[in-house]
Amino acid sequence: MRWNARGVTSAYDSSFGYVSAQGAPLVELLDPRPGERVLDLGCGTGVLTAEVAARGARVLGIDGSPGMIEKALAQYPGLDFIIGDGHDFSVAQPYDAVLSNAALHWMSRDPDLVIGNVRDALQPGGRFVAELGGSGNCAALIAAVSTAWREYGLREPELPWFFPSPAEYASRLEKGGFAVRLLEYFDRPTSLDECPDGAADWVRLFGAPLLEGLPGDIVEPLLRRVNELAAPALRRETGWMADYVRLRFAAVRR
Ligand SMILES: C[S@@+](CC[C@H](N)C(=O)[O-])C[C@H]1O[C@@H](n2cnc3c(N)ncnc32)[C@H](O)[C@@H]1O
């Protein structure tokens, strides 16, 4: 994944702090207890990791992006963070719980491998509590991108995300050795208040991989077209909304 550009990382915290802000209910669902060992997978800049630590748990944040980990360490010097890929990590001593907010949909290369690594990082009875994009997530944004790309004669963009349906993800969890205790699938239209250039800014930040390799002079007109196409569905009088659809679950390692 390509979250390691320093500029992107700081824009992430300043403009898109809502990602972690919306993770607060997840910490409630996790209900970390003092002394528990918790792993935060795809921890980003560590905001939720710190919340879990504030509840008295001993927490380790793992993220694939060196830039995110650098920032997390700078913000929370008393906490532990390491660089690691969800597809390829292991732990010396199993954890009581794994938390993951807005990160599993980026671990799209092999979701079953990620689930297997989480299972192996947990002791039997350990909790896996997470939220990720569900099927239909950002459908209007993605449709605008596809149409703009087609109009500019570009190949259909390869999307870097995995947005499973609830049935699909529950089945993966069960096959991966978890019992699913709770699974919610809901629309969460999300205001892009601090995204002055609307859908175009969303692509710049969250869809940056889509822009890789494009001729430099095409990017700005292409993103202007994305805004025109997305505006009818996503632009309100009060500003831009992203059409987020989320999957939130709590599962237990069998
Ligand atoms: C939207 S951010 C969410 C960060 C944090 N959980 C929060 O709530 O603010 C997604 C995070 O997933 C990380 N990520 C993406 N792919 C990853 C992978 N394969 N392994 C580990 N982390 C990954 C990114 O670097 C990024 O920090």
Image (cartoon, grey):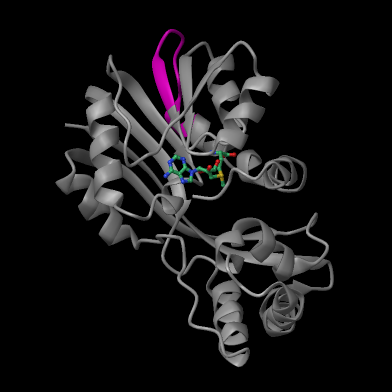
- Residue for point 43% across, 7% down: 35
189 above or below 180?
below
Q: Position of residue 25 (x, y in %)?
A: 54, 37
In this picture, which residue range is highlighted in magenta? 28-39
Q: Is residue 160 above or below residue 247?
A: below
Residue 118 located left or right of residue 227: left
**Picture coordinates of residue 241, whole percent (x, y):** 70, 65
Membership of 146 in magenta stretch: no
The quarter of the picture where residue 21 lies is: top right
Image point (33%, 58%), residue name: 166
Q: Residue at x 41, y 61 (%)?
A: 163
> Which residue is depicted at the point 63% across and 89% down?
152
Towards the viewer: 4 or 160: 4
Seen from this angle, which residue lies furthest top? 35
Q: Which residue is at the front of the view, 94 or 88?
A: 88
Q: Position of residue 7 (x, y in %)?
A: 73, 45
Which residue is nearer to you in this view: 112 or 30?
A: 112
Residue 247 visible in the picture: no
Residue 32 part of the magenta segment: yes
